Image (cartoon, rainbow, N blue to C red):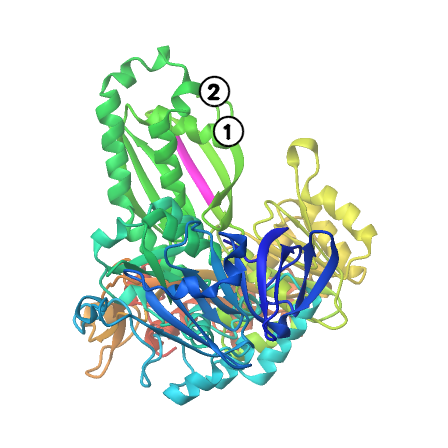
Amino acid sequence: MALSSQLQRITVKLANDDVIEGRAADFSPSSPFFHLERDGAPVTRIEMARVQFIHFGGDPGAGRDPGRWSTPAADAERITVTFAAGGSLTIYGTVMRSGPRGHLIAPAGAEDDTERIFVPPAAASDLDVSRPAADAEPDADAPQAADAPVQDLEDRWVPHSAGGRTLTSEERKRIANQRLGDVLLAANLITPEQLEHAIEEQRRDRTRKLGDILIEHEAVSADALSYALALQFGLPYVALDEIPVDPTVVKNMPEALARQHTVFPLKAAAGVLTVATADPVNIAALDHVRNATGLRVREVIAPADAIRRAIATYYGGRHALREIVGQITAERGDGLASAEEHLNLDDLGSDTAIVTFVSRLISEAVEWGASDIHILPQPDGARLLYRMDGVLQEQVRIDKAQLPAVVSRIKILGEMDITEHRLPQDGRARLTVGDRTVDLRISVIPTVVGESVVIRVLDKTIALRSLDGLGFDERDLAVYRHLIKRPQGIVLVTGPTGSGKTSTLYATLQEVRAETPRPHIVTVEDPVEYEMRDVNQIQVKPKIGFTFAAALRNIVRHDPDVILIGEIRDVETAQLAVQAALTGHRVLSTFHTNDAASALTRLMDMQVEPFLIASTVLGVLGQRLVRVICEACKETYEPDPAEARSLGVEPTPDLRFYRGAGCKECGNTGYRGRAAVYEFLVVNETIRPLVLERQSSATLRDAAVMGGMRTMPENLLAKVRSGLTTAEEALRLGLVHIGNGDS
């Protein structure tokens, strides 16, 4: 139950022993006061500092007789609250929450399961929780070293990848219940400057959480933030990817509940269910879990991404998809394909099993961080694949008889014509998956063996990366930052589809919008992949003639300082971009070329005069994305001579490369995440004369290299040698040049 109830009946016990009954009109545990409406009396303002405890739910008069809560009850904890003003209160029940926002207790044996007792943080000097000796089951409930799923916060322990430093027991007690920023500082997880910057940004937008801002700016990792929350609330932290989970315990909690609240069951013993959560202030989630399982709930803290991975792993994944496919096959048999032309496709796409299958297919893609879902028809059925970290991975196969129903359901989601099978179709959908808002771009193309479907998954709630997190060298990053702060000119990001151009532009915009004074930023995109604060984002609509060029003509009249063009696709857009730069605007855009130098010659091919290119283009960033080795399972090995020479490296006895062995954290792929491999061409005094002479891209590239530019192959080889990625990944990209051994 949420502690922000409207006109809820409560009983308030004050520190002077007065008892007041009424209805709370605006109660919040973090507020210094609230108002109480009483029958036949004026509204009373109650200062939280005067409150000893508040009774919610159940019999309204129960708060006048707290002795009823001190009766021992089976499987209940004995909770003793010592009040700062003197005296104490004993309650048999369960501590639902204990932290800086106060203590929330569910008394045992209550007739109404919404009954709660709230003790403000300042009211209690101590809270002691124990099990009566007669009821204690220490052997059953105590974690064993071999299989304990919950790691207590011991002096020596810091979660993987959290960073910072270990804290002693006394230090943890001292910082418990303090503000999150103070906890992060005490653990050396952030600097005072980073905290000050995040607080300043939070002041500008009160709806944003401090932790989200720090993660967005990569000041702190998700693991580190979860660790800090555990310290703040005095709760254990658990590394879900590193512990065994009993599948029988998972069955205690419905999957829908786990996904809705991002919680995961770890252990059940002595009537208590230990649950991992990323949000220790979500009281409603605990209530829902307790009501659904019939067990008392104990919280531990884990990162949200780790909880989602655990849900995807233990509640289904490929196994669940195969089970649904088997169910559909059993229900429909093989006669579906032969009778396809006689079926109502609308009903087919609305079939319960098909709806469940498609929903599962999309939700699993979101949980695993897939960028695309592919349904590829075959003569005997279809392959369903996810693109994760740039590589397609097969999840399941379906029979040919099931393909029309699956495609029809997807067409319904995308608001497409389910009766059209001869022409390509495009559609869009916005769905909620757990606590995430996801946009889908759907493309359906007919083939000789059935309709092929590709779904681009755009997670609107994912934190955007900063420039520091894209993998640029310090020297190149400093030059890039200098160019994007110039008052006018064009900066281009080039590469093939899926090379991370949009992510780089969004990271660039994040840096630009943080400038003081804040610039007026307008973007024109297709589609708007991520929504950004303080940025006017425009979606093009080619079907009604609202193209990039049409949008640009109008944008200039809105007096922007910075213009982002999603892609320069045609001659008119290129010419308008150049004109915008000439008239005093900063322009950021993308281009589809294989390297940085080719972008300049491509502009010439698009009828942009060389003197305009030389005077407006500041720099071109050519990039690809390379998979990053999983840090949890990274290992070194001695490459064989053939593998070394394939990268242009001369084998030596001490030569070592790196690879991932495969683990739970990376789904046994050996990779987790991607980073940019790039080359950055600055249009300087050396390059401009060559552009005016219409020199070839090879000549431009050679001149840039002579001026200090490191090419993409050289950058890739450096990342292989440093252990960021593997030799296998370098060969997959096809960028390495034989003979680069000295680079």
Q: Earlier in the sequence, mark 1 or mark 2?
A: 2
- Left-right relation of 452 to 272: right
Q: Is residue 439 above or below residue 65?
A: above
The answer to whether 341 appears left or right of 22 in the picture is left
Within 10 Å of disc 2 (Cα), the crowding (few <14, some 14-19, many 20+) is: few
Image coordinates of residue 467 in percent, x first then y, are 55, 69
Residue positioned 21% across, 72% down in the render: 639
Please, what is the dominant secondary structure of the magenta stretch?
strand
* Secondary structure state at the residue bearing disc 1: strand
| Residue picked out by circle 2 | 420
Question: What residue range appears in magenta?
Answer: 452-456
Residue depicted at 63% across the width and 74% down the height: 50
> Does 264 sit left or right of 184 as displayed?
left
Residue 123 horizontal/vertical position (percent)? 55, 76
Q: Amino acid at mark 2?
A: Glu
Find the residue positioned furthest to the top: 342
Residue at point 53%, 37% (across, down):
429
Say which of 315 and 54 sits in front. 54
Residue 454: within the magenta? yes
Q: Is residue 296 above or below residue 327?
A: below
Residue 248, given in percent of the width and then of the height, sits at 21, 52
Amino acid carrying label 1: it is: Gln
Q: Which residue is mark 1?
A: 425
- The image quadrant of residue 26 is bottom right
Q: Residues within 10 Å of mark 1 (few under 14, many from 20)?
A: some
In the picture, the disc for residue 321 is: none
Mark 1 vs 2: CB contact within 8 A: yes
- The image position of residue 48, as x and y in percent, is 63, 70
User: How far separated are the C-alphas under marks 1 and 2?
Assistant: 9 Å
